[in-house]
Amino acid sequence: MENFKQLSPLALAFMGDAIHTAFVREKVLAGTVNTINNYHNLAKKFCNAQKQKETLEAISDTLTEEEQNIVRRARNTHSKHSAKNFDEETYKKATAFEALIGYLYLSDQNERMLQILTLSVSEN
């Protein structure tokens, strides 16, 4: 996508959410054969604002200046939406995580994106 740098942080988060969810679902499906309900419950462990916030905090010291700018812009963007089950800080950091994933995906930084996505599905 040529104009990805013109996208808002929330548009990047929109894309990042889809990429993260697909990555998590693929990992869940690669595990033990299960029922659809069990797949969903397994995916929920990783596809939530708290886990995304924790992943972002774990990698914050390793972010490049460009990545830090994306995260900062996304975290500071005002959204009309709020998290149903999480506080505002958690929601903002989760949005920043999703924006980072969206940015890395759209800028073809796949190796870095996969590195972060892999951390997001760790049990730690």
Image: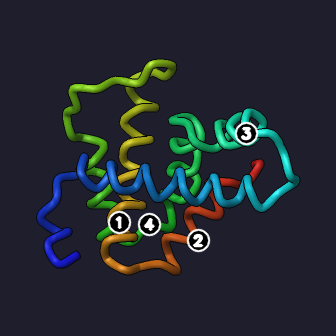
Q: Label 2: few (<14), some or many (≥20) within 10 Å?
A: few
Q: Name the residue under label 1.
A: 67
Q: Mark 4 points at which residue?
A: 63
Mark nearest the camera among 1 and 3 is 3
Q: Label 1: few (<14), some or many (≥20) within 10 Å?
A: some
In the drawing, what numbered circle is on residue 36? 3
In the drawing, what numbered circle is on residue 111? none
Kind of element beneath mark 3: helix
Picture coordinates of residue 16 (x, y %)?
40, 55
Mark nearest the camera among 3 and 2 is 3
Kind of element beneath mark 1: helix
- Residue at 41% across, 79% down: 109
| Circles 1, 4 touching at the beta carbon (< 8 Å) | yes
Q: Which of marks 4 and 2 is nearer the N terminus?
A: 4
Q: Distance between the residues labelled 4 and 2?
A: 12 Å
- Residue at 33% across, 50% down: 13
Q: How far apart are marks 1 and 3 (CA)?
A: 35 Å
Residue placed most toward the observer, 9 or 14: 14
Kind of element beneath mark 4: loop
In the image, residue 37 sits, relative to residue 22, either above or below, namely above
